[in-house]
Image: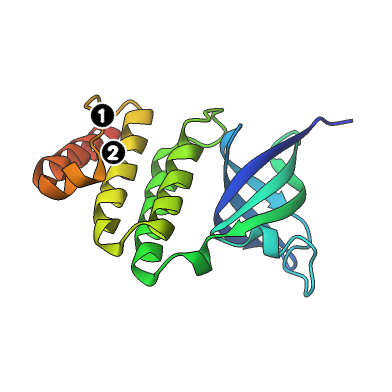
Amino acid sequence: MRHKYQTTALVLARSPRGEMSATVALLTADLGLIRARVQGVRRPGARLAAALTTFAESEVILVRGRESWRVAGASLVQNWLPKLPRAARERAVRIIGFALRLIPMDTIDASFFPIVHETFTAFAREPETLGDAFECRAILCLLAALGLDAGQVPDPSEIVRSRSPIIARINRGIALSGL
């Protein structure tokens, strides 16, 4: 019998797999970034469909197979999509794309989840005028967690005042990553 892992996860992406199944990219609180197979999630009225949409934060039960992860269960904690204004959703999509390109799959690292979760929370609660600063801060934090930036991560108010050096640091980190 395989061990079941229960953890909180943010659904970063979902792509079809076969006729009724899908593959989801999950940023988990305990296991880092993983891809997992979900059987029957695309079937009309599927039990797990709401908990495994993009931008969903869910409690998931994962089973590690020989070659991949499989979602055995999921319950929706909250859906971030309706909570984020349009501009914040666009920023969140850029952060998710960045995370999917840079964070290594199946590397157990719990440092990435709080960065993305705190950024989503800030996008939902803080004024839209600080959106760009929160996006820059999230990218800097991800780069620092990956070891691609060693500087101090500034507060959003500092980023608003001096954006150019922050963008230069982000560009240096991206260049170091080889993207």
Which sits in the foreground, 99 or 29? 29
Q: Earlier in the sequence, mark 2 or mark 1?
A: 2
Q: How is the image coloured?
A: rainbow
Q: Which residue is mark 1?
A: 149
Q: Which residue is mark 2?
A: 140
Amino acid marked by disc 2: Leu
Which sits in the foreground, 127 or 8? 127
Residue in the image at 28% along x and 38% along y: 140
Amino acid marked by disc 1: Asp
Badge 2 crowding class, 10 Å Cα cut-off, few under 14, some 14 to 19, many 20 or more, is many
Circles 2 and 1 in contact, beta carbons < 8 Å: yes
Residue 36 appears anywhere in the view? yes
Q: Is residue 151 left or right of residue 91?
A: left
Q: CA distance from mark 2 to mark 1?
A: 7 Å
The image quarter in which residue 116 lies: top left
Q: In the orientation shown, which residue stands out farthest toward the right?
A: 1
Is the N terminus in the top left, top right, bottom left or bottom right quadrant?
top right
Q: In the orientation shown, which residue stands out farthest toward the bottom?
A: 44
